[in-house]
Amino acid sequence: MPLPGIQPVLMDEKRNEIEGNQVVGSLCIKFPWPGIARTIWGNHDRYKETYFSAFPGKYFTGDGALRDEVGYYRITGRVDDVVIVSGHNLGTAPIEDAINEHPAVAESAIVGFPHDIKGNALYGYVILKETGEDRNKENLTKEINQYIADHIGPIAKLDKIQFVSGLPKTRSGKIMRRILRKIAEGDFSNFGDTSTLLNPEVVEEITKGKI
């Protein structure tokens, strides 16, 4: 009998499977597949808690995803990447999606940083397309925050926006958000191991340009 392929499924907050296309939810896998991790060395309970407790009977990837009109999946970001601002739980992925709708924006990354009044505030790192390089950064900041307000709400506006030429990424393309968080917090003392970065030079550039 042939082995089944990977069978993705989207789940809602009530642990129900989401049917149809053009929908967004938590990305899970229905059945085991060749190569699935079987445990965490020395801590099998943690393995079960991490991957199988959120949606019983399904492997939870930890990512949110969009299933488009033809059934293709697009990862939208980690669902646990949430910043609490003035008591509101704000997912960074939807905010980044809103920012990326701006015609001058190529890519963005959002992290939280401590704020005396809000508890946390949002710090955005934004890469511009060539069409936006010569535009007034102050106007761009206002326009980007207006996009966020229109798509998410005023509570999700960014307190600080830093325009950068690149983001620290691993060779697999994953953004090293822990580095961006430390920079946003003003802590440049220890970025940890940066040997896996594809572009380590961008860390110094972002550090020098911190707002």
Image: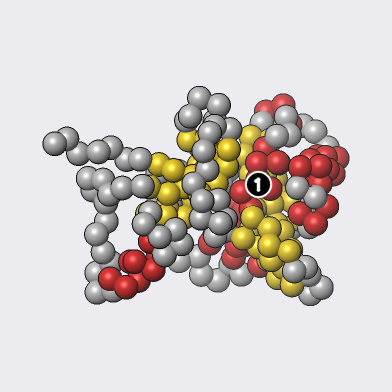
Tell me, yes or no, if residue 131 can be seen here.
yes
Q: Is residue 136 above or below residue 155?
A: above
Q: Position of residue 25 (x, y in %)?
A: 55, 46
Q: Nearer the viewer, residue 48 or 196?
A: 48
Give residue 13's quadrant in the image: bottom right
Circle 1: element type:
helix
Residue, x 47% and y 30% (percent of image)? 72
- 26 vs 36, left or right, is right
Residue type at numbered disc 1 = Pro
Residue, x 65% and y 41% (percent of image)? 97
Q: Is residue 115 above or below residue 108?
A: below
Give residue 45's quadrant in the image: bottom left
- 182 vs 118, left or right, is left
Tell me, yes or no, if residue 133 can be seen here.
no
Q: Nearer the viewer, residue 120 or 152?
A: 152
Q: Position of residue 147 (x, y in %)?
A: 79, 40
Q: Residues within 10 Å of mark 1 (few under 14, many from 20)?
A: some
- 130 vs 138, left or right, is left
The colour mode here is secondary structure
Residue, x 64% and y 34% (percent of image)? 106
Q: Position of residue 17 (x, y in %)?
A: 49, 46
| Image quadrant containing the N terminus | top left
- 11 vs 37, left or right, is right
Check disc 1 and report the residue beneath it. 94
From this viewpoint, which residue is outermost toward the left?
1
- How many numbered tags mark residues here? 1
Residue, x 22% and y 45% (percent of image)? 34
Give residue 131's quadrant in the image: top right
Q: Position of residue 43 (x, y in %)?
A: 28, 74
